[in-house]
Image: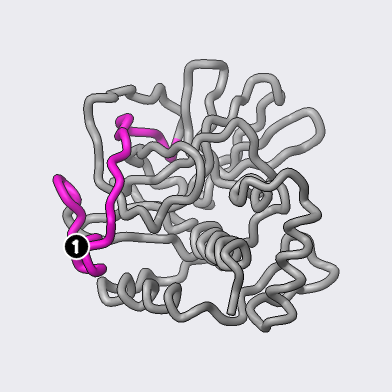
C-alpha cells in the first residue's frame, strides 16, 4: 500500500509521461508535491521502485518508467479509454486527449463517471505555425476534468496551425497550459517572443540561444537570443472535439 505522497508522485509521473512522452524532472516533481528539496523525491522514487511501481532506466536522463499503477488510477484510465484511445504519434508522444463536445460541458467528463470539472479561462487562439499575437479574451471559460490538472494555475488556448501535428496537437485542438516561467529542453511550451508574439513549440536550449522547434518537418525551427523568449506556461494536456 502506498503512502499519500508516494501515490501523489506516481500519479504526477504517470500523467506527465502520458502528456509529454518523457518523465518529469526532479525540479518539476519537487514543485508538484510542494517539497522543499529534491532529496524527498529521491526517497519517494526509491520506495516506489522497491514496491514495483517504478523502474529507472540507468544511463539515461529523465528516464522513469511506470511499471504498474494502483487500482484507482488504472480505473480512471479505463474510463477515459472508453471514449476512444488516441493513436500514438511519432517520437513516442501520446497526447492526453479528452474527446467530445465541450461547448458548455465536456461529454468526456460526463462519460467518465461525472468527474469533477474545473473552469479554466480560454484565452483565444495561439499559433502552432508562425508566431502570432495571442488573443486575450478572458470572458470565455471552458470546463476541464480536474483529473487532467496538477498543482498550480492553468489556462486554455485554442490551437491555430498544424506545425505540432507530429506531437499529436492538431489545428482546432484546445491545449491546457500550466502557468510557469521556467522550462527544460524538450518541454512543449507557450513562448512569448519579443514581448508581443506568442507560439506553441518545443523548447530547446542552445548555449545563449533558445530554439522553438516545430513537430512538423515542413516547418523550420526558429532560433532566438535567450533574452528574447519568455516562457509563459507548459503543456499538460489537450481537448479535442469532432
**Residue 71: which quarter of the image?**
bottom left
Q: Depth check: 59 or 221 in front?
A: 59
Highlighted range, magenta: 102-129
**Quick one: quadrant of the N terminus?**
bottom right
Looking at the image, the residue that sits furthest to the left is 104
- Residue depicted at 53% across the width and 30% down the height: 232
- Relative horizontal placement of residue 119, taking residue 22 as reference (left or right): left
In the image, is residue 53 part of the stretch drawn in magenta? no
Horizontal and vertical percent position of residue 142: 25, 41
Q: Depth check: 162 or 49 in front?
A: 49
Q: Is residue 79 above or below residue 101?
A: below
Q: Is residue 168 visible?
A: yes
- Residue depicted at 48% across the width and 41% down the height: 178
Horizontal and vertical percent position of residue 100: 20, 59
Q: Depth check: 102 or 162 in front?
A: 102
- Residue depicted at 72% across the width and 77% down the height: 49
**Residue 6: which quarter of the image?**
bottom right
- Relative horizontal placement of residue 153, taking residue 42 as reference (left or right): left
Q: Which residue is mark 1?
A: 110
Amino acid at each position: 500500500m502506498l503512502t499519500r505522497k508516494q501515490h501523489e508522485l506516481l500519479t504526477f509521473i504517470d500523467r506527465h509521461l502520458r502528456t509529454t512522452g518523457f518523465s518529469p524532472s526532479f525540479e518539476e516533481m519537487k514543485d508538484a508535491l510542494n517539497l522543499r528539496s529534491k532529496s524527498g523525491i529521491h526517497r519517494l522514487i526509491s520506495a516506489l521502485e522497491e514496491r514495483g511501481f517504478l523502474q529507472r532506466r540507468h544511463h539515461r536522463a529523465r528516464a522513469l518508467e511506470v511499471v504498474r499503477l494502483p487500482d484507482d488510477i488504472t480505473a480512471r484510465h479505463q474510463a477515459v479509454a472508453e471514449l476512444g484511445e488516441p493513436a500514438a504519434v511519432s517520437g513516442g508522444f501520446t497526447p492526453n486527449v479528452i474527446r467530445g463536445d465541450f461547448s458548455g460541458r465536456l461529454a468526456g467528463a460526463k462519460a467518465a463517471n461525472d468527474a469533477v470539472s474545473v473552469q479554466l479561462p480560454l484565452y483565444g487562439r495561439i499559433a502552432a505555425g508562425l508566431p502570432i499575437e495571442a488573443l486575450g479574451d478572458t470572458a470565455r471559460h471552458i470546463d476541464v476534468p480536474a483529473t487532467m490538472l496538477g498543482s498550480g494555475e492553468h489556462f486554455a488556448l485554442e490551437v491555430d496551425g498544424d506545425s505540432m501535428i507530429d506531437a499529436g496537437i492538431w489545428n482546432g485542438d484546445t491545449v491546457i497550459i500550466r502557468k510557469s516561467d521556467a522550462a527544460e529542453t524538450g518541454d512543449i511550451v507557450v513562448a512569448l517572443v519579443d514581448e508581443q508574439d506568442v507560439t506553441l513549440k518545443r523548447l530547446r536550449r542552445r548555449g545563449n540561444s533558445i530554439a522553438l522547434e516545430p513537430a512538423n518537418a515542413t516547418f523550420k525551427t526558429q532560433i532566438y537570443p535567450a533574452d528574447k523568449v519568455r516562457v509563459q506556461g507548459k503543456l499538460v494536456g489537450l481537448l479535442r472535439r469532432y
